[in-house]
Amino acid sequence: MNVPAGSSSRTRVRLPADVVRPFEVYVNGIAQEEGADFRVDGRTLVFDRELRTEGSLGFWRWLSLWIGIAGTYRQNDSVDVTYQRGGKPVVATKLPLEPLG
């Protein structure tokens, strides 16, 4: 794949309205570190890498997976945030990913 020099894809993830600090961020179940893996810009998390979800699979793709003809090898990232609400732990899972280009 030819990618022009200096181009990078970034991803934005909007935080749910009730998320307050402190919170923890996970991508595909792996803890992320603020400053190294993402930054907080207002109510959004900004990743300096492309995160993508696979999207919905069509009938033929599901059928081929079900009968074992093909596997699913597409990128399918998941961003989860853990935080406290009323003193109880809460997990916001599979937050929507928005490309920033």
Image (tube, rainbow, N blue to C red):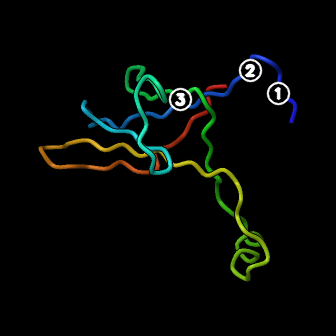
* Sequence-earlier tag: 2 or 3: 2
Left or right? Give the position of 45 relative to 52: left
Quarter of the C terminus within the rendering: top right
Residue that numbered label 1 is attached to: 3
Q: Which mark is residue 47?
A: 3
Report if the CB atoms under discs 1 and 3 are less than 8 Å apart: no
Q: Is residue 27 above or below residue 56?
A: above
Q: Which class describes the residues within 10 Å of circle 3: few (<14), some (14-19), or many (20+)?
A: many
Q: Which class describes the residues within 10 Å of circle 2: few (<14), some (14-19), or many (20+)?
A: few
Q: Is residue 14 above or below residue 35?
A: below
> Residue pushed farthest right?
2
Q: Identify the residue at horizontal 77%, vertical 71% (top origin).
A: 70
Whole-Å distance between the Cαs marked 1 and 3? 19 Å
Q: Identify the residue at horizontal 44%, vertical 33% (top origin).
A: 14
Residue that numbered label 2 is attached to: 7
Report if the CB atoms under discs 2 and 1 are less than 8 Å apart: yes
Q: Which mark is residue 98?
A: none
x%, y% of residue 47? Answer: 53, 29
Q: Is residue 68 above or below residue 31?
A: below
Q: Amino acid at mark 1?
A: Val
> Residue pushed farthest left?
87
x%, y% of residue 6? Answer: 75, 16
- Determine the secondary structure under disc 1: loop
Q: Amino acid at mark 3?
A: Phe
Q: Amino acid at mark 2?
A: Ser
Q: Which class describes the residues within 10 Å of circle 1: few (<14), some (14-19), or many (20+)?
A: few
Left or right? Give the position of 21 relative to 40: left
Whole-Å distance between the Cαs marked 2 and 1? 7 Å
- Determine the secondary structure under disc 2: loop
